[in-house]
């Protein structure tokens, strides 16, 4: 594969940051030495692990996840490429699945005081973020358990693939996903690392070098599974949610075997959930203005603009053209396409 070949051309050797990292086991350090690596977005390097690019701590956590996680049939998994609408979908899923447990969507609802990432934990950043010797006991978790992950479908533990648990995937057009990632990482990156310039980050993104990328492999993995097993994987689009969130939320509830009743619909339950999870509402909550995620970054950075097509304000015509080509080439024949903002399409087809 061209990607692997390129990565192998990079100088190999010891990464000092890895050597001194006490949170990484010796086994992980040795594994990292054997993997192709490239300059990272947020860490000095990302490593090509099981066919996707990943940061060292995540690789260790994913190995623990693959080794120990036992899926239950009632589990729900929210899966995404980073910056595709994870926070939004986690909130909508949590509020929908647990709607009978809370008497109000405006008072005392957990989403008013917790960030969605705290209520729907990521396997790779939260659940299995500790060393292998500290594997959490998940048997006491309230059911249905809802988890989040950025791990590509092919690398999910076999128990998830084999159990009757459900996976909801949200996909976003790569133009906006790229932009959202670049801006987010610029804000949260440690000061010791120089910020990636837009052009450099864009080149890396187009080659697939970004956390959990290439983006096309990630999307296609879940896309194909959603076609082959529509009861297992529901494939959603961020742009569709922005256009008609009611329709998409009803799809989610039906897929999870908890459809909204006519009575719920007429009494405004769907509207209440949508309002509670809306960008405007979530952005203004104390927890999302001043809280932090896993002591890693401030929650406020998860809520930027929440719009479709903002990338048109950042990408040059030649960049838009280049990414359009990459998308066409990589997704060709798959049936997966994006209703990209018309201005972007115009820019991409009119290189000056
Ligand atoms: P993550 O992968 O770090 O969890 P994720 O939530 O997937 O991030 O993506 C963040 C994007 O979703 C941001 O997009 P932007 O940079 O283009 O603005 C963020 O604004 C947007 N977002 C967050 N919450 C919502 C929401 N409730 N409704 C719509 N968009 C949202």
Image (cartoon, helix red, strand yellow):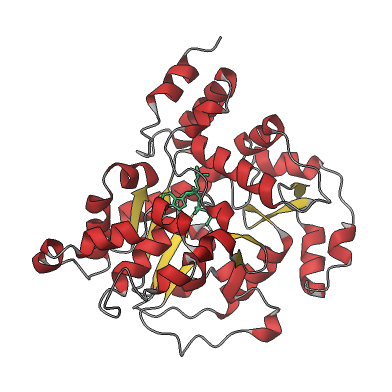
Position of residue 97 measured from the top left corner of the image (x, y, whole percent): 30, 72
Q: Residue at x 55, y 42 (%)?
A: 180
Residue 92, how many percent across, how many down? 35, 62
Q: In the image, is 341 to the left or to the right of 19?
A: left
Q: Nearer the viewer, residue 220 or 105?
A: 105
- Please identify the residue farthest to the top as the structure is shown: 352
Q: Does residue 253 appear left or right of residue 218 in this picture? A: left
The C terminus sits in image quarter? top right
User: Residue 37 placed where, x, y %?
Assistant: 76, 50
Residue 215 visible in rendering: yes
Q: Quadrant of residue 160?
A: bottom left
Q: Residue at x 54, y 88 (%)?
A: 137
Vertical comparison of 302 with 160: above or below: above
Quadrant where the N terminus is found in the figure:
top right
Q: Is residue 91 above or below residue 48?
A: below
In the image, residue 224 above or below residue 341: below
Taking depth in this image into account, of 215 and 157 the one nearest to the observer is 215
**Is the residue 134 above or below the residue 219 in the image?**
below
Residue 342 falls in image quadrant: top left
Residue 229 visible in the displayed image: no
State the residue in front, 39 or 311: 311
Label tally:
0
Residue 346 drawn at (x, y percent) = 43, 18
Please name whichever residue, 119 or 11, is drawn nearer the observer in this view of the structure.
119
The residue at the point 46 percent across, 29 percent down is: 328
Q: Residue at x 50, y 38 (%)?
A: 176
Q: Is residue 48 left or right of residue 191?
A: left
């Amino acid at each position: 594969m061209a990607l692997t070949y390129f990565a192998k051309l990079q100088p190999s050797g010891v990464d000092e940051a890895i050597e001194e990292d006490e949170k990484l086991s010796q086994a992980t350090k040795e594994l990292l030495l054997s993997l192709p690596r490239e300059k990272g977005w947020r860490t000095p390097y990302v490593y090509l692990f099981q066919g996707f690019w990943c940061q060292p701590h995540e690789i260790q956590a994913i190995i623990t996840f693959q080794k120990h996680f036992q899926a239950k049939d009632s589990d729900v998994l929210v899966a995404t490429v980073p910056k595709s609408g994870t926070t939004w979908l986690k909130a909508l899923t949590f509020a929908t699945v647990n709607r009978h447990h809370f008497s109000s969507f405006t008072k005392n609802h957990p989403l008013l005081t917790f960030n969605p990432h705290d209520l729907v934990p990521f396997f790779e950043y939260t659940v299995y973020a500790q060393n292998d010797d500290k594997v959490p006991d998940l048997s006491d978790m309230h059911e249905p358990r809802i988890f989040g992950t950025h791990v590509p479908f092919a690398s999910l533990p076999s128990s998830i693939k084999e159990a009757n648990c459900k996976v909801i995937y949200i996909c976003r057009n790569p133009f906006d996903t790229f932009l959202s990632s670049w801006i987010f990482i610029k804000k949260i990156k440690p000061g010791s690392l120089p910020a990636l310039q837009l052009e450099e980050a864009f080149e890396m993104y187009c080659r697939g070098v970004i956390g959990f990328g290439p983006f096309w492999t990630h999307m296609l993995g879940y896309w194909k599974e959603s076609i082959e097993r529509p009861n297992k994987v529901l494939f959603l689009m961020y742009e569709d949610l922005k256009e008609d969130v009611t329709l998409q939320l009803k799809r989610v509830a039906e897929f999870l075997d908890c459809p909204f009743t006519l009575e719920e619909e007429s009494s405004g339950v769907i509207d209440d959930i949508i309002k509670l999870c809306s960008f405007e509402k979530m952005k203004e909550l104390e927890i999302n203005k001043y809280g932090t995620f896993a002591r890693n970054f401030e929650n406020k950075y998860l809520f930027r603009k929440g719009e479709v097509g903002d990338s048109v304000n950042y990408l040059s015509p030649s960049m838009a053209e280049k990414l359009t080509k990459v998308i066409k080439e990589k997704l060709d024949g798959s049936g997966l396409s994006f209703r990209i903002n018309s201005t972007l399409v115009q820019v991409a087809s009119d290189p000056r």
